[in-house]
Amino acid sequence: MSQNDNLFKKIMRGEIPSSKVYEDDYVYAFNDISPTAPTHILIIPKAPLDSLNELTEDDAVTAGRLLVTAAKLAKQLGFAQDGYRCVINTGANAGQTVPHLHLHLLAGREFGWPAG
């Protein structure tokens, strides 16, 4: 599957509807259609990156924007103080199902540890 055809690229292009939560020049965030927590937001970079394995030094700003956006949304949506979890799955064995880097922002319930 080419980068232009993956699910998240289609969502960003508006070809597949999404419940957008946030967007800027670097990232697009939307509610997950199959949430695993009361709040489950996907934050995806607009840059064509398959996974964390693709990151280089040149992608430091983009990678940082994923985390900054997660913190910003946690504050704006009112769950920063209660706590939240950020998850990035890399590769099939970790549970990555879409070949585009994305961060899961999860909140609204207590999370156990270990995560897996």
Image (cartoon, helix red, strand yellow):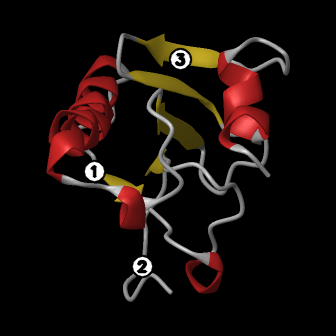
Q: Amino acid at mark 3?
A: Val
From this view, report whether residue 104 is shown above or below residue 4.
Answer: below
Q: Amino acid at mark 1?
A: Gly
Dot 1: within a 10 Å radius of its alpha carbon, few (fewer than 14), some, or many (20 or more) residues?
A: some
Check residue 112 in the rendering and tell me which mark sits there, or answer none: 2
Q: Percent x, y for residue 24?
A: 38, 10
**Comparing marks 1 and 3, which lies closer to the viewer?**
3
SS type, badge 2: loop
Of 12 and 20, which appears nearest the observer? 12
Q: Percent x, y for residue 102?
A: 50, 47
From this view, report whether residue 98 is shown above or below residue 92.
Answer: above
Which of disc 3 and disc 2 is earlier in sequence?
3
Q: Percent x, y for residue 108?
A: 48, 46
Dot 3 corresponds to which residue? 21
Dot 1 corresponds to which residue? 83
SS type, badge 1: loop
Q: Relative to residue 51, is residue 91 drawn left or right?
A: right
Of 104 and 80, which appears nearest the observer? 104
Dot 2: within a 10 Å radius of its alpha carbon, few (fewer than 14), some, or many (20 or more) residues?
A: few
Which of disc 2 and disc 1 is earlier in sequence?
1
Which of disc 3 and disc 1 is earlier in sequence?
3
Of 96 and 42, which appears nearest the observer? 96
**In the rendered image, is residue 81 in sight?**
no
From this view, report whether residue 102 is shown above or below residue 22.
Answer: below
Q: Relative to residue 12, is residue 80 drawn left or right?
A: left
